[in-house]
Amino acid sequence: MCGIVGYLGTKEAYPILINGLKRLEYRGYDSAGLAIHNGNSIVHYKKKGKVSKLEQEAEGQPKDGNLGIAHTRWATHGEPNDVNSHPHASQSGRFFMIHNGIIENYDAIKEALIDRGFSFQSDTDTEVLVNLIEDIFMEGALSLEKAVQAALNQVSGAYAIAIIDNEEPDMMVVARLGSPLVVGLDNGNFYVASDATPFVEYTKKAVYLEDGEMAVLRRNQTISVFNIESNTTIEPYIHQLTLDIEQIEKGGYEHFMLKEIYEQSRSIYDSLRGRLLPDEGKVIMRGVSEYKERFLKADRIIVVACGTSWHAGLVAEYIFEELARIPVEVEYASEFRYRNPIISEKDVVIAISQSGETADTLAAIKMAKQKGATIFGVCNIVGSSIARETHAGAFTHAGPEIGVASTKAFTSQVAVLALMAIKIGYERGSLAKTEYIQYLHELNRIPDMVEEMLSSNDDNLLGIAKTYASASNFLYLGRGVNFPVALEGALKLKEISYIHAEGYPAAEMKHGPIALIDENMPVVIIAQKNANYEKVVSNAQEVKARKGKIIAIVSPEDTEMRKIADHAIEVPETFELLSPLLTTIPLQMLSYYIAVIRGCDVDQPRNLAKSVTVE
Ligand code: F6R
């Protein structure tokens, strides 16, 4: 959470910083700020609210210079206001710093600094850190980098920081532990950011700092990287980025979320491309093959994830148990990591994460790794912390997801996990060859089915959205592999439209939630023709009998459910275990339209951030 941007080079820093902040706004948008060195001194602006507010604040003000840092905040310590916004200056005004993360022992350090005569303007841990750096510097550290290094060796917690010095117009110091930080390199120009999106149009060369590393950037020199604790010099590995500018722009859509929903035919295809070869009867997944024996002999699979990725894990539980006959446990990473769980060397832990930076998921896999489990990652972001912490993995290749509500990342996760389950099931002998081949062909059809579905359901969904946009509550019901889809549908609605929504296994309704049903309660029921169909129809009858309004996801040839439902949304039929790849999509669209009708900020819903790097 929080996005950081920095620039040092020959260009004007301001437009680079502002554009960079806009690209990183998905990481938090409580406040924004920047500091620019104009060659003589540092000017800075900060403002509560989005980056556009900061732009208004800086309009007409001096902001020339080609060294600068900027920050977009998701508040942790201290309410979102101008004072708590970053950058934070040290007491003397010499150093300016931006920070993503949490300094856990900031209270004790703050007290010690107060005893030494420091006073503080903000409630933030960041202001404490920049003053600790100043204190060490003033005590006689030889250089800013030495002061930063000494300070970082005293703090615990997580950080990605960038700091500049009023007296040094040609230098920036950056460091990371637990929060991401990448430096773009372009012939002596340096771009610093939480991910590569702010500088992708300037350079494709990037150095991802590892945990515990810091770097000193000097104008017209090469980057120098070293380990914060041991002080050893590190030869940086220069990544070649494959990200394109088109991938991170809206491309004519009103919102990123809508664009990403419509991209799903392509993103699912990309997740399977080169891996799924139905005509040859093959699945090529290097990470799975490298750890084949571990999967074949696994006592169980433990999935750790959060939010939407956790829902993808629940879908995977049904698929793996059915096709590969391996017991699966799906854990909230935040609970798992604090529970002292029983983990053995025969367990395979699958970490699912779009961002690859979710703090709880990262901590959960570190713990499981220490206990000897094999860790497999299903991440979207190449080079992310979780991807690097795992033994092996399969990237989802969904492309950048910028809308805060996750859409295409979910379906890509499910596609990758389904492919893994099919491969492992076949190799374990629990999936017969004919079924295996059928699954490969069916999975291969999914991108086209998604394409067809997205081009036909629009008006119907918009009409339903208009009818229920002012509802206060929604229920989502599903059975079997579509129960997690009900959870995901409810999460999408609440996070972007602020309507209270709950997902339930359809049969659980009569154990409590049925008490909520009256003529004002819209109930979304996933009711495709499959093994559970008759039972779901009975559950729908129970809703109808209490005058609830039924919005049903149905198969094209359905007749029974349509008779009961107030609204029907057709979704093509596929194998039941693959159906979440299709049934999820109209639920995303419904949430999107409802949020737009209610005037909500679809891409940046209140209180949220895309990358949850705090616990
Ligand atoms: C919901 C959403 C969140 C994320 C969760 C995990 O739309 O986006 O619930 O799914 O914060 O994030 P990742 O997948 O990045 O670990």
Image (cartoon, grey):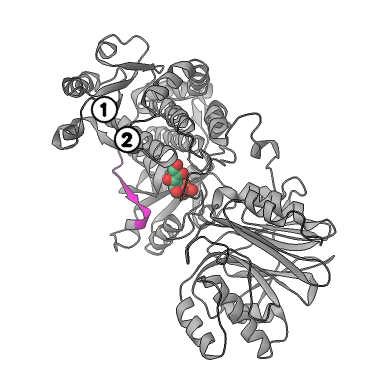
User: SS class of the residue under badge 2?
Assistant: loop
> Is residue 575 left or right of 399 when viewed as pictured?
left
- x then y, percent, for residue 305: 40, 49
User: SS class of the residue under badge 1?
Assistant: loop
Q: Does residue 417 appear in the picture of this structure?
A: yes
Q: Residue tagged by mark 2?
A: 472
368 w.r.t. 133: above or below: above
Determine whether the beta carbon of the residue marked 2 sits less than 8 angstroms from the nearest atom of ligand 1: no
Q: Which residues are magenta?
A: 323-334
Q: Does residue 3 appear in the picture of this structure?
A: no
272 w.r.t. 191: above or below: above
Q: Quadrant of the C terminus?
A: bottom left
Residue nearest the observer in this picture, 157 or 44? 44
Q: CA distance from mark 2 to mark 1?
A: 8 Å
Q: Is residue 331 magenta?
A: yes
Q: Residue tagged by mark 1?
A: 520
- x then y, percent, for residue 186: 80, 55
Question: Which label belongs to residue 287?
Answer: none
Amino acid type of the residue that numbered disc 2 sits on in the rendered structure: Ser
- Most distant residue in the left direction: 511
**Label 2 close to label 1 by CB (< 8 Å):** yes
Q: Is residue 308 magenta?
A: no
- Name the residue: 38% across, 57% down: 373
Q: Kindly indicate the quadrant of the structure image that contains residue 91.
A: bottom right
- Name the residue: 65% across, 37% down: 247
- Most distant residue in the front direction: 60
Q: Which class describes the residues within 10 Å of circle 2: few (<14), some (14-19), or many (20+)?
A: few
Comes first in the chain, label 2 or label 1: 2
Amino acid type of the residue that numbered disc 1 sits on in the rendered structure: Asn
